[in-house]
Image: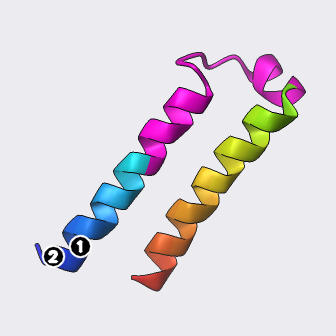
Amino acid sequence: MTIEEKKLFTDVLQCIISIDEHLEGRRIYEEYKNNKTKRRSVERELEIIGEAVISY
């Protein structure tokens, strides 16, 4: 595995950890749907993952 690949996986892992933190360990769709800040935070982390994977 190259250094670039390790950086990519590290970035993706950090985003996944951040998503879990934003969701506060809870996977309740209604809470997610009704909380605009939480939704935007998670969506931004998913965008970052997408950008990292596409750029690779």
User: What amino acid does circle 2 point to?
Assistant: Ile
Q: Quadrant of the N terminus?
A: bottom left
Q: Is residue 40 above or below residue 12?
A: above
Dominant secondary structure (helix, strand or loop) of the stretch shown in magenta: helix
Left or right of residue 49: residue 13 = left
Residue count near mark 2 (Cα–Cα under 10 Å), binned few <14, some 14–19, many ≥20: few
Question: SS of the residue at dot 1?
Answer: helix
In this rendering, the answer to whether 2 lies above or below 13 is below
Residue 33 part of the magenta-drawn span: yes
Q: Identify residue type, mark 1.
A: Glu
**31 left or right of 45 in image:** right
Residue at the location (69% across, 43% down)? Answer: 41
The part of the chain drawn in magenta is: 15-34
Where is residue 55 drawn, in percent x and y? 46, 83
As displayed, is residue 22 above or below residue 10? above
- Give how far across and how far down residue 50 sits, in percent: 55, 67
Question: Where, by quadrant of the figure, is residue 33 drawn?
Answer: top right
Residue that appears at 74% across and 33% down = 38
Mark 1 nearby-residue class (10 Å; few <14, some 14–19, many ≥20): few
Q: Secondary structure at mark 2?
A: helix
Left or right: 2 as drawn, with respect to 43? left
* Residue 26 on image: x %, y %: 59, 16
> Measuring 89% from the left and 25% from the top, which residue is drawn there?
34
Which residue is at a point 27% across and 68% down the rendered structure image? Answer: 7
Residue 28 colored in magenta in the image: yes
Q: Which residue is mark 1?
A: 5
Give residue 51's mark: none
**Picture quadrant where residue 19 is located:** top right
Assess whether mark 1 and mark 2 are in contact (beta carbons under 8 angstroms): yes
Q: Which residue is mark 2?
A: 3
